[in-house]
Image (cartoon, helix red, strand yellow):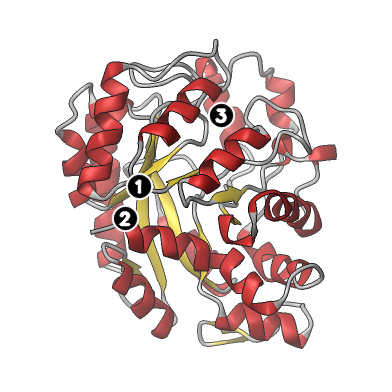
Amino acid sequence: MTVIGKETTQWGVNPDAARVHRDALVWDDHAGFAPYPDLDLRFLERWLLSGASYLSVNVGWGVMTWDQTLRCAAHYRRWIETHADSYVLAERITDIRRAKKERKLAIAFDLEGADSLNKNVDLVSVYYQIGVRQMNLAYNKNSDYAGGCMDVDAPLSVLGRQVVTEMNRVGMVVDCSHTGYSSSMEIMELSNKPVIFSHANPKALWDHPRNIKDDQIIACARTGGVIGVNGASAFLADNDCSPAAIAKNIKYIADLVGVNHVGIGIDSVIDPDEVVKFSKIYPECWPNVTLAEQQKKVFAQPEQLPRLTEELLHSFVEDDVMNILGGNFERVAAQIWR
């Protein structure tokens, strides 16, 4: 692999794939590493060198309190601002396009679960102002806002409905990843803006509680939204998170609802010990998942993105690959962000 400045010339893929990957606005809609208020983010360079243009980074998740989330977001903002030679804090769509032109990585924040709101709808706007551009209402377990996908199926709560309405108002994308079936279907019916699954795979290809049914995929597409296929091995058949396996899930969704409603949210976890460590601290977040099962998990890495482009070109024309890699999520964000 040859690196010239910040650009990798071939990434070990064929010339056509390298060209498409360089030209595309590669939008990874969710990274899976755990948020810490003192995390050294130098590893983000791996996305930059892998040709990514945009990455959504988690600053809070189900078990974190509002003050922990704010500390994490503040640290991430400062880190990005002090590394402006390579990174751009994406507050508007124009920031992402500028980052692409300048060969930098644009970063915005997301929340996995709405517990960081502390039951206060007013905080939706505050989080938007500090860079959170998408949020889901539950993280696997049922919350005060919505049902979780690994819990007893539950409807959207009154508070959850208020949060969806407020997210629509302020320009924050509603994400149904990790959300239970009934709540996700209600969210997609309620929202007056496109709804996404930032990192979720079709249950038809691998029957796991975190994966989503065909009618959820269809409902998402009807809102104008996008399903981001993830690269967590537990949610892919045969524990296989290769580019070919990810491309197979993308093709399934494209065949079901059209190529304009599928993207990527690779959900990369960089530290292989991270999931096991968090499982020991917060076992309630992954109900019915044993420590042995957690230890088997493997995650696709940012370096696989160029090879994913190469795989997609076996099944799709170039324009469609460009949309899958980023155009579809960019379209949704342009409709919603303010």
> Residue lying farthest right?
238
Name the residue tied to disc 3: 277
Rendered view: 176 above or below 52: above
| Mark 2 in CB contact with mark 1 (< 8 angstroms) | yes
Residue 68 quadrant: top left
The secondary element bearing badge 1 is classed as: loop
For badge 2, the amino acid type reads: Ile
Q: Looking at the picture, tell me which residue is in the foreground, 140 or 93.
A: 93
Residue 32 visible? The answer is no
Instruction: Specify which label sits upstream in the sequence, 3 or 1.
Output: 1
Q: In the image, 235: left or right of 181?
A: right
Sort mark 3 into few (<14), some (14-19) or many (20+) by Cα contacts within 10 Å: some
Which residue is drawn at the image coordinates 20% and 47% (left, top)?
Answer: 170
Rendered view: 194 above or below 204: below
Q: Of the numbered discs in the image, which one, if any, rests on residue 193?
A: 1
Per the model, the C-alpha gap separating discs 3 and 2 is: 36 Å
Quarter the N terminus occupies? bottom right
Which residue is drawn at the image coordinates 32% and 68% (left, top)?
Answer: 93
Viewer-side label of 3, 1: 1
Q: Position of residue 58 (x, y in %)?
A: 41, 45
Residue 333 quadrant: bottom left
Which residue is drawn at the image coordinates 73% and 41% (left, top)?
Answer: 233
Sort mark 1 into few (<14), some (14-19) or many (20+) by Cα contacts within 10 Å: many
